[in-house]
Image (cartoon, rainbow, N blue to C red):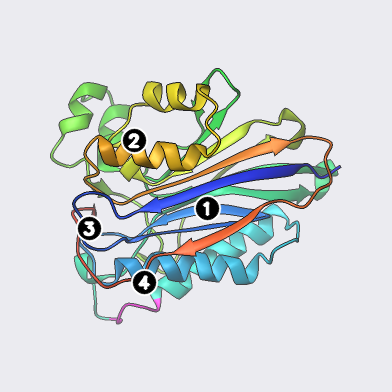
């Protein structure tokens, strides 16, 4: 039985930036955040292009297969890639992160599951009411240093390469998308966010806010991140599953396209 979901979503330009390069799509079956790669041309257009592509290929009310989701991400990558001229490289390339969850049907298991996808350093968390569990791994230079044991978590927070990501839509002709699955009957809540949230708030603080059971959790999280400094755009989607209810899922979509500004997120060349 398809479970219904309540969706809370919010995006904010933050306290420092002049352009919001984040976009999101919260339209069942797709709940994703895209963070345009600042330091790049057209980061705001890149994030919008990615979510518009996914909204088209993974239409509202459908339940795609995992293969169809990967194909849709590949198509979104091609659309973002097309924003750049063939001779453009490095910081001249339009690009965006992408992270989120998609409701899918898995034919070989005859089951409906949540598919977690990630490219870049936007994140997906699971929340069970007590514990916040990170489901994605950042594709970043600092994450690689952490994985190799060369720096500590504390050093990572102030590392000079903390803004360097190692994967993004639009950076290459082909994109390697991380994916994992969460059974639908596990019924966790999900938090999908751009790094504007996690650079301002620790996982512990995010969990404390969620534990307070706010009526609009995404708005409260975004407001807290902006109050903590808001050095980057902040975008959050909170998906709360409701098992055994066939009511239609909440739908909310938005993108931000108000101009162009380069921020300090950069791809590794």
On screen, residue 14 above or below 225 = below
Q: Report the Cα–Cα distance between label 2 and label 3.
A: 34 Å
Look at discs 1 and 3 and give the one toward the viewer. Answer: 1
The tally of labels here is 4
Taking the image as drawn, is residue 75 in sight? no
Question: For mark 2, what is the residue?
Answer: 224
On screen, residue 155 above or below 197 = above
64 vs 230, left or right, is: right
Question: For mark 4, what is the residue?
Answer: 45
Q: Are marks 4 and 2 in contact (CB under 8 Å)?
A: no
Look at discs 4 and 2 and give the one toward the viewer. Answer: 2
Which badge, 1 or 2, comes first in the chain's sequence? 1
Look at discs 3 and 4 and give the one toward the viewer. Answer: 4
214 vs 58, left or right, is: left
Numbered range of the magenta stretch: 82-86
Look at discs 2 and 3 and give the one toward the viewer. Answer: 2
The mark found on residue 269 in the picture is 3
Residue drawn at point x = 49 percent, y = 62 percent: 254
Question: For mark 1, what is the residue?
Answer: 32
Which badge, 1 or 3, comes first in the chain's sequence? 1
- Can residue 85 be found in the magenta stretch? yes
Secondary structure of the residue carrying tag 3 is: loop
Secondary structure of the residue carrying tag 4 is: helix
């Amino acid at each position: 039985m398809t479970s219904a979901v309540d969706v809370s979503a919010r995006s904010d330009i933050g306290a420092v930036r002049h352009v919001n390069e984040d976009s999101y799509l919260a339209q069942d079956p797709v709940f994703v955040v895209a963070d345009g790669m600042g330091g790049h041309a057209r980061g705001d257009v890149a994030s919008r292009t990615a979510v518009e592509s996914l909204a088209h290929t993974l239409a509202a009310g459908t339940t795609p297969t995992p293969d169809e989701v990967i194909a849709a991400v590949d198509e979104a990558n091609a659309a973002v890639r097309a924003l750049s001229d063939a001779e453009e490289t490095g910081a001249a390339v339009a690009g965006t992160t992408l992270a989120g969850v998609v409701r899918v049907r898995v034919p070989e298991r005859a089951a409906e599951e949540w598919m977690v996808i990630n490219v870049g350093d936007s994140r997906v968390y699971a929340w069970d009411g007590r514990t916040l569990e990170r489901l994605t791994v950042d594709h970043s230079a600092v994450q690689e240093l952490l994985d190799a044991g060369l720096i500590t978590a504390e050093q990572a927070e102030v590392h000079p390469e903390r803004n360097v990501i190692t994967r993004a839509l639009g950076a290459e002709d082909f994109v390697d998308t991380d994916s994992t699955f969460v059974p639908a009957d596990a019924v966790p809540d999900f938090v999908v966010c751009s790094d504007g949230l996690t650079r301002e708030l620790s996982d512990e603080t995010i969990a404390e806010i969620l534990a307070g059971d706010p009526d609009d959790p995404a708005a409260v999280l975004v407001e807290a991140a902006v109050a903590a400094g808001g050095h980057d755009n902040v975008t959050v989607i909170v998906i709360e599953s409701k098992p055994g209810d066939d009511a239609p899922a909440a739908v909310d979509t938005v993108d931000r396209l108000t101009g162009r500004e380069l921020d300090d997120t950069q791809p590794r060349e």
